[in-house]
Amino acid sequence: MRSRLPLVLGESPSTEDLAAIDREWPLIAAELDLVDAEITMLYAEDNGGPSALDWRRLRRAESRVTRAAAEVAARPAHVCDLVEVRLTTECRYGCKVLRCRKCGAEQVSHRAVYGCPAGQRPRRAA
């Protein structure tokens, strides 16, 4: 029996659906690699056991899934549409506070052009 909603034919995914898939694609690809490594391990069991390379491939696929999941979780769920709302009071260089029109989240934009040291790129040690 089918427990999910029936597939409605003729409807294409919305732009939000496509954007969500695109955002999560690194995680999807990493999970596909993990499934492939697990299948290889199952086949190896029937043929004398997995090799050291098979175990390494499985561990690397698992760590890729973990890294990809952390990256996807750290990204915002949408692309922020930032607009300047005021100058920050935390920085004496006149840096700006930006607010997202969609979610209302605010962030400070420190800019090196204003002389702000927080907006400058870190220098590499020679």
Image (spheres, helix red, strand yellow):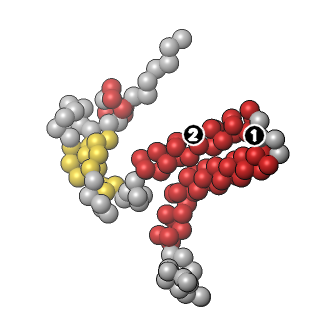
Q: Residues within 10 Å of mark 2 (few under 14, many from 20)?
A: some
Residue 112 spot, x, y in % from top left: 36, 32
Q: Report, in whole angstroms, how far the alpha carbon at label 1 lies from the one at label 2.
A: 19 Å
Q: Nearer the viewer, residue 44 or 12?
A: 44
Residue 23 spot, x, y in % from top left: 51, 57
Residue 106 spot, x, y in % from top left: 26, 50
60 to 80, vertically: above or below: above
Q: Is residue 69 visible?
A: yes
Q: Secondary structure at mark 1?
A: loop
Q: Amino acid at mark 2?
A: Ser
Q: Residue at x 52, y 57 (%)?
A: 24
Q: Nearer the viewer, residue 93 or 103?
A: 103
Q: Residue at x 66, y 41 (%)?
A: 58
Q: Name the mark on residue 63.
A: 2
Q: Nearer the viewer, residue 108 or 116?
A: 108
36 to 58, vertically: above or below: below
Left or right: where 96 falls relative to 40:
left
Q: Name the residue carrying label 1.
A: 50
Q: Amino acid at mark 1?
A: Pro
